[in-house]
Image (cartoon, coloured by chain):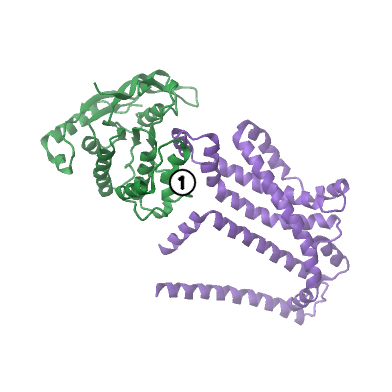
């Protein structure tokens, strides 16, 4: 019975937020129609939806290019971040040397680097991938490094009394202990990555959501711009969702805890 | 003459504080643990009990004196001593079975434990049915038993237990003491046991070292002559009370002074 009540409550909550967002959209629609706003200033939700449906194949072909860049850049960033974190964990001196540089590198605006990368590497996919790597690398590396160094020292001591090697301590203790922090960083990196690719495409590209965005903006096709934004938002959310699913698979003990908290 | 498992001679350890001052943590400690003996070390918090264990395992080095493990100098031997800290230190990402198996995974040359034997041990440690559970779903007493079982898995005949029941409530605690005696009698390891509970020390031990601080030093050594196996009934005998009075006296004679 208790369980049923809980489900009822959950549906009720979902229903409430659904009604809330629907009325927001409705309000937007009404404002556009009542004040007869020109569509290049603010298109109504229905207009955006129609545009989305009509240009869906075109949007998807652009999205495909952007997502390819995002995926390559994202995986590269994870690989590089992993290697650097491991090296910094092993050699603390190197960490003291590199870590400040990592932080400073984050303050450099991507908008300033993107054109430079285009001059260096042309209009192809490479400069976009580099931008994605640049924006993802930092959250991945920092979260993993912090996670690795936050391992309980007593646990490491315990493993030493069992005569564990450095390698065993890293893989059996430090790495699993760092996973929650690592996935938190990955989540942030995922949201940055799509944005990074879009910004890189603004500067110049043959295809992609970013370059499509600049094109429709220049021709005042605001409904198409909004449709573009919707696609970017949905793709990013799906990306984050995917990472959440992977993190649940990788850390089954976390789900377990949640179940118990709910019971209590 | 019984075999000396662990022996400390004139051990001194200093702690270097951040402001440059040197704090004497341990001063001229002499101790011995014979084979298959259960010896408690009792003393007020901060008298350097845990430091003693860190020196015995080789995690820290003494500033003076010598430690012998199985007759060999600590700094020259790689002898393994199993060590259980105050916290259970179970890995949250491993199931209880995998946590317990950790020492076997690390030391590939350790004697393998068959699934049947492991099953028996889980039964003995009251963990049966929880092999696949994660530590955060277990009660404090069960976590502590799991940590103890992991300590037993270490391929060594010596065990250092640092207040293993310190975080448990009174009832669970006395159950665990009784149970630990059973397990110890079946396995016959040599045990050093840190506690600051007088009753616990008398009930469990063959001998008790009483420490005072600071610097931490041995202020008394008391052999406990109760027959084994022991039951909690002995806690109301006059002999028991005289032991208790003796230890209390020693502890109040050498309180911690700043």
Q: Secondary structure at mark 1?
A: loop
Residue B86 in view of the camera:
no
Q: Quadrant of the C terminus of chain A?
A: bottom left
In this rendering, the count of numbered labels is: 1
Residue A24 in view of the camera:
yes
List the single residue furthest toward the bottom: A34
Q: Residue at x 60, y 52 (%)?
A: A183
Image height of B66 relative to A23, above or below: above
Q: Quadrant of the N terminus of chain A?
A: bottom left
Q: Is residue B206 left or right of residue B61?
A: left
Q: Residue B248 at x, y = what percent?
A: 21, 31
Q: Residue A169 at x, y = what percent?
A: 52, 38
Tell which chain the image draws in purple: A
Image height of B214 relative to B127, above or below: above
Mark 1 — residue? B91
List the single residue furthest toward the left: B238
User: For the residue carrying disc 1, how many other residues have a C-alpha within 10 Å: few (<14), some (14-19), or many (20+)?
Assistant: many
Q: Residue B158 at x, y = what percent?
A: 34, 32
Q: Residue at x 25, y 23 (%)?
A: B2
- Which quadrant of the view contains residue B240? top left
Q: Residue B255 at x, y = what percent?
A: 29, 28
Front residue (pair A152, A48)? A152
Tell which chain the image draws in green: B
Q: Residue at x 64, y 77 (%)?
A: A23
Q: Chain of mark 1?
A: B
Q: Is residue A70 left or right of residue A122?
A: left
């Amino acid at each position: 019975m208790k369980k049923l009540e809980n489900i009822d409550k959950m549906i009720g909550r979902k229903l409430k937020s659904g009604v809330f967002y629907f009325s927001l959209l409705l309000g937007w629609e009404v404002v556009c129609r009542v004040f007869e706003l020109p569509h290049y200033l603010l298109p109504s939700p229905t207009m955006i939806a129609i545009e989305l449906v009509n240009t869906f194949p075109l949007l998807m072909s652009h999205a495909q290019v952007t997502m390819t860049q995002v995926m390559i850049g994202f995986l590269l960033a994870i690989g590089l971040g992993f290697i650097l974190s491991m090296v910094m964990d092993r050699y603390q001196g190197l960490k003291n040397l590199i870590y400040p540089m990592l932080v400073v590198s984050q303050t450099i605006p991507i908008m300033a680097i993107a054109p430079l990368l285009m001059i260096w590497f042309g209009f192809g996919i490479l400069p976009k991938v580099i931008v994605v790597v640049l924006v993802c690398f930092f959250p991945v590396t920092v979260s993993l490094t912090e996670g690795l160094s936050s391992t309980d020292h007593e646990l490491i001591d315990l493993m030493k009394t069992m005569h564990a090697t450095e390698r065993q301590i890293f893989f059996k203790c430090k790495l699993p202990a760092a996973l929650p922090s690592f996935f938190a960083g990955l989540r942030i990196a995922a949201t940055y990555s799509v944005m990074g690719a879009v910004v890189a495409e603004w500067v110049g590209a043959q295809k992609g959501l970013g370059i499509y965005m600049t094109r429709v903006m220049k021709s005042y096709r605001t409904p198409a711009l909004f449709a573009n934004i919707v696609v970017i938002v949905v793709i990013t959310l799906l990306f984050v969702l995917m990472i959440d699913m992977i993190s649940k698979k990788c850390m089954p003990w976390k789900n377990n805890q949640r179940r118990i908290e709910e019971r209590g | 003459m019984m075999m000396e498992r662990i022996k400390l001679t004139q051990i001194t350890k200093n702690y270097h504080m951040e402001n440059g001052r040197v704090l004497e943590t341990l001063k001229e400690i002499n101790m011995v643990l014979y084979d298959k003996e259960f010896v408690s070390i009792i003393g007020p918090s901060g008298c350097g009990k845990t430091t003693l264990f860190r020196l015995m395992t080789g995690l820290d080095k003494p500033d003076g004196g010598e430690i012998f493990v199985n007759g060999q100098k600590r700094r020259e031997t790689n002898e393994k001593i199993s060590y259980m800290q105050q916290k259970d230190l179970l890995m949250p990402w491993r199931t209880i079975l995998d946590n317990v198996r950790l020492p076997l995974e690390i030391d590939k040359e350790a004697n393998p434990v068959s699934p049947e034997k492991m099953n028996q041990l889980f039964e003995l440690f009251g963990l049966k049915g929880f092999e696949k559970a994660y530590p955060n779903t277990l009660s404090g007493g069960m976590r502590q038993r799991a940590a103890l079982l992991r300590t037993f898995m270490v391929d060594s005949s010596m065990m250092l237990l640092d207040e293993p029941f310190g975080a448990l409530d009174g009832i669970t605690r006395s159950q665990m003491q009784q149970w630990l005696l059973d397990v110890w009698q079946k396995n016959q390891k040599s045990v050093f046991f840190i506690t600051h509970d007088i009753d616990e020390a008398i009930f469990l031990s063959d001998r008790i070292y009483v420490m005072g601080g600071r610097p931490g030093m041995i202020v008394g050594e008391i052999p406990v002559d109760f027959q084994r196996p022991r039951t909690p009934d002995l806690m109301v005998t006059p002999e028991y009370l005289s032991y208790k009075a003796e230890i209390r006296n020693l502890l109040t004679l050498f309180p911690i002074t700043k």
